[in-house]
């Protein structure tokens, strides 16, 4: 009568098609993760070897010693990426690498990579701009009034004035 294994109809049986598929997917996922870990380890070994070679070349004197600073944080894309090139559809990364190869990377007026250069409008008079920022700074006004208020309390004046207002 009835033929076949009734266990194949149970959800927990390891030979059901659904469970075999789950096991296969888990194995594939595990294999992909293992390959990814191996790739990351290989990249780490290569990077360490590169750094060791760089350090050795610096010690020997074949390569100029490179100072690790935080200047790269302040180098905005405005100094490195030409807006015309971007609008023409040329890849930005390639342009940046070419620009860095042409000139020594770092903060200088030649490369246009000055800290805050992305925020400064072209042709702005920095001294006048800085003076207006200081003059309009709310903390400066509060401190000025506080310092003036201490002097006024001693001399009996009622209202303090802020310079430039």
Image: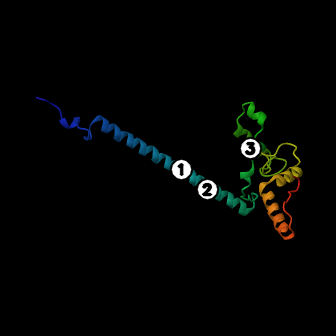
Identify the secondary structure beneath mark 3. Answer: helix
Res. 161 image quadrant:
bottom right
Residue at mark 2 to residue at mark 3: CA–CA distance: 30 Å
Vertical position of residue 62 compared to residue 116: above or below: below
Identity of the residue furthest to the top in this view: 1
Specify the label residue 40 is tagged with.
Answer: 1
Residue lying at the far bottom in this picture: please name it: 154
Contact between marks 3 and 1 (CB within 8 A): the answer is no
Marks 3, 1: nearer the viewer: 3
Q: Position of residue 101 (x, y in %)?
A: 76, 45
Task: In the rendered view, tell whether residue 156 sits above or below residue 69.
Answer: below
Badge 3 density bin: few <14, some 14–19, many ≥20, Cα 10 Å = some
Could you classify mark 1 by the number of other residues whose Cα lies within 10 Å: few (under 14), some (14-19), or many (20 or more)?
few
Pointer 2: what residue? 49
Q: Residue at x 75, y 30 (%)?
A: 88
Q: Nearer the viewer, residue 130 or 38?
A: 130
Question: Up-down: is 13 above or below 67?
Answer: above
Q: Nearer the viewer, mark 2 or mark 3?
A: 3
The first of marks 3 and 1 along the sequence is 1
Q: CA distance from mark 3 to mark 1?
A: 29 Å
Considering only order in the chain, which callout, 1 or 2, is on the residue closer to the N terminus? Answer: 1
**Relative horizontal placement of residue 7, taking residue 129 as reference (left or right):** left
Q: Give the crowd class for mark 2: few <14, some 14-19, many >=20 residues within 10 Å.
A: few
Q: Secondary structure at mark 1?
A: helix
Sequence-wise, the earlier of marks 2 and 3 is 2
Image quarter where the N terminus lies is: top left
The residue shown at (38%, 43%) is 27
Please state if 55 lies on the left or on the right of 85 as rendered.
left
**CA distance for labels 2 and 1:** 14 Å
Q: Identify the residue position indicated by label 3 in the image.
A: 77
Q: Nearer the viewer, residue 22 or 66?
A: 22
Q: Are marks 2 and 1 in contact (CB under 8 Å)?
A: no
């Amino acid at each position: 009568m009835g033929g076949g294994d009734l266990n194949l109809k149970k959800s927990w049986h390891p030979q059901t098609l659904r469970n075999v598929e789950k096991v296969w997917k888990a194995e594939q996922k595990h294999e992909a993760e293992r390959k990814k870990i191996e790739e990351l380890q290989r990249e780490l070994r290569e990077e360490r070897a590169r750094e060791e070679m760089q350090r050795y070349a610096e010690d020997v004197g074949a390569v100029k010693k490179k100072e690790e600073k935080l200047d790269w944080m302040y180098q905005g894309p405005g100094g490195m990426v030409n807006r015309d090139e971007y609008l023409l559809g040329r890849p930005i990364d390639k342009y940046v690498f070419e620009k860095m190869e042409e000139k020594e990377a770092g903060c200088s007026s030649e490369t246009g990579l000055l800290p805050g250069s992305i925020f400064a409008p072209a042709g702005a008079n920095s001294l006048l701009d800085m003076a207006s920022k200081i003059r309009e700074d709310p903390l400066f006004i509060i401190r000025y009034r506080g310092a003036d208020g201490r002097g006024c309390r001693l001399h009996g004046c009622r209202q303090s004035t802020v310079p430039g207002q």
